[in-house]
Image: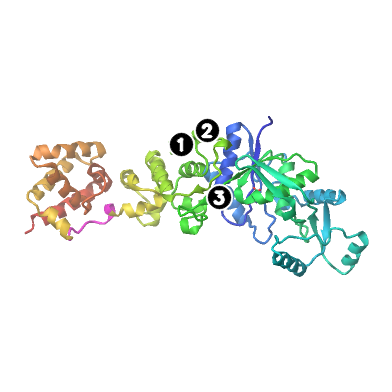
Amino acid sequence: MSKARVRFAPSPTGPLHIGGARSALFNWLYARHSGGEFIVRIEDTDLDRSKREFEEEILLSLRWLGLDWDEGVEVGGQNGPYRQTERLDIYREVAEKLLQTGHAYHCYCTEEELAAEREAFMAKGELPRYGGRCRDLCQADREKLEAEGKRSVLRFKVPEDRIISVNDMVRGKVDFACEGIGDFIIVKSDGIPTYNFAVAVDDHLMEINHVIRAEEHLPNTPRQILIYEALAWETPSFAHISLILGKDRAKMSKRHGATSLEQYRKQGYLPEALFNFLSLLGWSPGGEDEVLSMENIVEQFQLDRVSKSPAVFDLDKLNWINGFYIRQSPLEKIVELALPYLKEGGYVPEEPTGQDKAQFRAMISVVRNYLSNLAEITDHVEIFYKDPTYEEEDMQAVLKQDQVSQVLSAVRQRITDAGLLNEESAKAMIKKLPKELGIGGKKVFMPLRVALTGHTQGPELYQVIPALGMEKTLKRLDKAIAVASST
Ligand code: GLU
């Protein structure tokens, strides 16, 4: 079999959404798994809604996700241009061929006429469609209409009484009766091709042999097959991947969380987490594992394990996967990614000193265990910045127990003796305390926790001490000792 050539063909009318990202990813995976080629083509024929900014954002999002392409916008290739508005001459030529072979014709119907026709079909309980009024206009009719200043579109002549079968690699055989299709527009009156026409022309000329895209394009497929047939072009294989639904089984929308990849990036989701999560939206590798590396997914990806049923977007699962990657990534990487959030929250000085940096490192190493995305970090670092007042009743209750000032003073002594403690030495010091002081663990650790953080639960104490740093640790201990000793 020849090499797989697949494509992602976004319309730059908005940012890259979860659904689009999943389509791009499945195409990319298909190509990378089989040693094929992945092409990115920009479908910008909706002149009013297409914007260069969106194109740039989509491409950035694709790259952020970890995808690369062998041909397409930005990288070039032998089958360009890869932006549809730069291919208008190509469509014109193909449209001319369809006109000459009788597969297409000029239609002069006005919007009003078409609307009236649609109404009439609906009144009869039939599918609204174009009834073929201009199908058989002769040259003289056309000249007359043109002399009247009427503008025309080009319509494709859909054969009557035929069934078009799509042998879909995901959905199986799906039949469409031509009757319900109606002669559709292939070139608008301004000379711009419609989606169905441009997509078929491009997929053919770019030698795409597998079209993998969202289920919503399935009804377009018979139209595209008709164009291939009229031009005696080989039809590619099609794979329509299912809709993405929210957990409530409604179509995924803003209500279910962020919908664009850029929003997830901004919230501090890691690309490897989204890559992993998106790959499981409709595909499964068979085993139970939900955390899979890019290499592993590429190795296992097959279309026959892509499900026909809708995929469910489970934000909790994404959060869990993202939290996992945040904990597993090298600390340095997380520090770098987390700093912008801390800066924005005002937690990082303009020019951090070496000691500041070491402390951030220690702090991030503690709080990353609690994050499902990096933007949440500012909620978790509060304990390191806001000195506790110990005024709350439950804080007082803990600090006013017997022997608390003795415990806290002993810890203070050990910390000053040791100099700045790191996680390891702090752990060793804390572990020995109950035995050395002859006091039960609970009576040691809870007051210490309250003294250091102002909370009765939270991160491991041996992590809290280095993250606070010497100065804050001693300051908090002193204050807590004062509270504990006051009557
Ligand atoms: N430009 C179309 C879209 O963004 C692409 C559809 C296709 O893949 O054929 O939905």
Amino acid under label 2?
A: Gln
Residue 166 x %, y %: 68, 43
Label 1: element kind: loop
From the viewer's side, name the closer residue of 481 and 27: 27
Q: Is residue 102 magenta?
A: no
Q: Tell me which numbered mark, 1 or 3, is placed earlier along the sequence.
A: 3
Asked if the residue under mark 1 is in contact with the one under mark 2, i.e. CB atoms within 8 Å, the reply is yes
The residue identified by callout 3 is 243
Placement of 318 over or under 431, stated as above or below: below
The residue identified by callout 2 is 300
Residue 181 x %, y %: 73, 54
Label 3: element kind: loop
Amino acid under label 1?
A: Leu
Q: Is residue 295 visible?
A: yes
Q: Is residue 387 magenta?
A: yes
Residue 26 x %, y %: 57, 41
Q: Which residues are magenta?
A: 383-391
Can you tell which of label 1 and label 3 is closer to the viewer? Answer: 3
Q: CA distance from mark 2 to mark 1?
A: 10 Å
Amino acid under label 3?
A: Leu
- Label 1: how many Cα within 10 Å (few below 14, some 14–19, many 20+): some
Placement of 139 over or under 33, stated as above or below: below
The residue identified by callout 1 is 292
Asked if the residue under mark 3 is in contact with the one under mark 2, i.e. CB atoms within 8 Å, the reply is no
- Label 3: how many Cα within 10 Å (few below 14, some 14–19, many 20+): some
Asked if the residue under mark 3 is in contact with the one under mark 1, i.e. CB atoms within 8 Å, the reply is no
